[in-house]
Image (cartoon, helix red, strand yellow):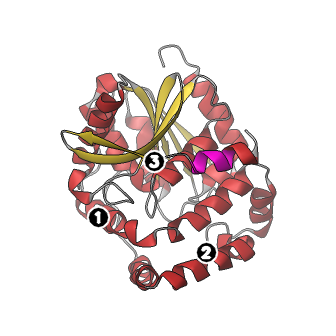
Amino acid sequence: MTNAEWDGLLSLPVTMAETPLGRVEHVSVGDGEALLALHGGMGGRDQGLILARAVLAEWTGRRVIAPSRPGYLGTPQASGATPEAQADLYAALLDALGVERAVVAAVSAGGPSAVQFALRHPGRCRALILVSCCTGPLAVPETLRRRLSLMRWFARFGWLSALMRRRIERDPAGTASRAIPDPVTRSNTLSHPVAGSLMKALQRSPFVELGRRLPGTLNDLDQFERMAALRFDEIAVPLLAIHGTGDRVVPFAHGERGRLATDGELMAVEGGEHVVVFTHLDAIRERVAGFLDRPGI
């Protein structure tokens, strides 16, 4: 897929599905086996597309469905606050789109609802791919709380968001330094023909309609602090967990739980940070392709 084709994906028309459980904003592209792509914190359907673009080397024969989770962009928080409610909402969205089953891929804060989908709707879930995902209680660092308070100010004054977006566009390496502290890895990632453009798109995206991404983010953090560890031993669908051993946002132990599933496997990326899907994109794509080629998926 060329950069022009990728830019076209991000500008696809956004559709609102009306389901018995609430409204769901989403983008659907392609034909074939469905992949439901669930974004993380400060995200939305645009970041779901970024996730799908990162993990899938080849889109031919696949339909990618990228919803905005409740509290993000056009999907109201009332459509589902808990991971369980969000999982049921995904099933209702698939019903509305006429999709019987889907592979589910999730990143970071999208993890709890993705796991709940596999637990609550196993007949609708072909397989589960978890990238740097939260899978149990997660204490929120005070530094992150302070950063989100600052984001509220950016959201209140649109020119501040625009200023941040321009700063990110001028200095993507400086922006990426917190997520990728190693300068060699950072340079290699940003110069990669695919990973670089995806990383830059991810860095810009929170500052587009920032105020409509904050409610879902704050709800996610509240949910993470009070939820119990997810029951991976009850997951019956094929599962691939991908997690960096050096993840400072969601500790590696969250990824290790993937091996507790009946048919679970773990791709441990030595020294990988929370954005391992970009820093190790080629290796992850190869592993995902092999996983999806397994009989029965």
- Image quarter where the N terminus lies is top right
Q: Amino acid at mark 2?
A: Arg
Residue 292 vs 7, above or below: the answer is above
- Residue of label 1: 219
Residue 209 image position (x, y, % from top left): 46, 68
Q: Residue at x 60, y 57 (%)?
A: 275
Rendered image: mark on residue 14: 3
Question: In the rendering, at what x and y percent does residue 270 appear?
Answer: 64, 51
Q: Position of residue 244 (x, y in %)?
A: 58, 53
List the single residue furthest toward the front. Answer: 13
In the image, farthest residue toward the left: 20
* Crowd around label 3: few <14 · some 14–19 · many ≥20 (10 Å): some
Sooner in the amino-acid sequence: mark 2 or mark 1: 2
Circle 2 or circle 1, nearest the eye: 2
User: Secondary structure under badge 3?
Assistant: loop
Quarter of the view holding residue 36: top left
Residue, x 43% and y 76% (percent of image)? Answer: 144
Q: Is residue 126 visible?
A: no
Label 2 secondary element = helix
- Whole-angstrom CA distance, mark 2 to mark 1, is 24 Å
Q: Check disc 2 and report the residue beneath it.
A: 165
> Identity of the amino acid at label 1?
Asn
Report the span colored magenta: 6-11
